[in-house]
Amino acid sequence: MEIAVSNIVWSKGLNQFFKFLNHLELRGIKGVELALNCFWDEPLAIKNHNYIKLKNEIERRGMRIVSLHSLTFNRPDLELFNTLNQRSKLIEYLKKFCDIANLLDCKNIVFGSPKARKTFNKNKDELDDIFLDFLQKIDSAITNVYFNIEPLSKKFCNYLNNFQEGIDLLKLGNFKNIFIQLDARTIIENNEDIFNIFENSSHIKHCHVSNPKLLIPGEPYSQIHSLINEGLNKIKYKGFVTAEITRQKKIKDCNYLDQTIRSINKLYKDC
């Protein structure tokens, strides 16, 4: 189990991103998670050679890209449950993100996208049917990358709000590349059964950690983080634990990143 940090903890812009990488390198962090919209408004419009350059800049610092997230942050028009046309466009968009992941030698992408999950007053059975069809199309189209569904509490959307709902859905399909994101923030917000989550550990390929509001993990939720860390160790989780922490404008980027690294190193470690 190793530590990664998402670039949303740092100022936006490509030049700023390289400063972020330098700071991670100095602190011995080996994994970086990318929200590409922090430096490109439309990541799919970027030429492949720019991605290769980005990958090389990360790898020459002894790091690797562990996941892509915030996939549709700049595309609120891509809706899952509205029209078939919009859903088809969303599928094509996500498939291209999987191609980018392969280009970057990145094994995970995270599908949160709360704005894409507006339910338009459809009932649960209809929503489930649409979502399963969506997952089947994604699953059959991608290779060498795990598509991780991120449960989001009802503060953010009205569909797929906890880990168990994700498990119930995956059991209805025969998926090769679809998994459930383990997300400490959502577990805390929902007061979820941590034991039950790790009983279904075969569905976990990736993990985000933070306090609610995407703040640094710690008090008053340190005990929950400790239980999640214990569970990850019991299942012999070999992936990265990513700090998904948003930047605080009133604190210098380097200082806030140092606080983040200290906290995650303290709470999430191999026993």
Image (cartoon, helix red, strand yellow):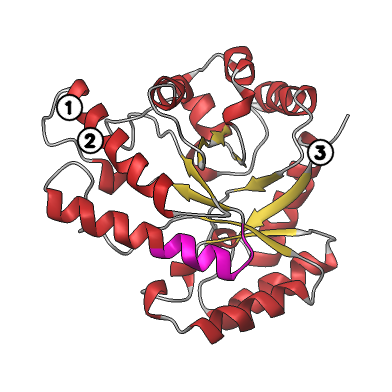
Q: Identity of the amino acid at label 1? A: Glu
Circle 3 — which element? helix
Q: Report the residue that reaches farthest toward the right.
A: 271
Q: For the image shown, how many numbered marks are present on the structure?
A: 3
CA distance separating discs 1 and 2: 6 Å
Q: Nearer the viewer, residue 13 or 235?
A: 235
Q: Residues at badges 1 and 2 in contact (C-beta under 8 Å)? A: yes
Horizontal side, residue 215 vs residue 165: left or right? right
Q: Which residue position holds label 1?
A: 126
Q: Which mark is residue 32?
A: none
Horizontal side, residue 239 vs residue 140: left or right? right
Quadrant where the image shows the C terminus: top right
Q: Which residue position holds label 2?
A: 130
Q: Identity of the amino acid at label 2? A: Ile
Is residue 78 visible to us here?
A: no
Query: N-terminal of the two: label 3 or label 2?
Result: 2
State which quadrant residue 160 falls in: top left
Residue 11 image offset from top left, x and y in percent: 55, 70
CA distance separating discs 3 and 2: 41 Å
Quadrant where the image shows the N terminus: top right
Q: Compared to 262, does 60 lie above or below?
A: below
- First to last magenta residue range: 96-106
Q: Compared to 167, does 109 lie above or below?
A: below
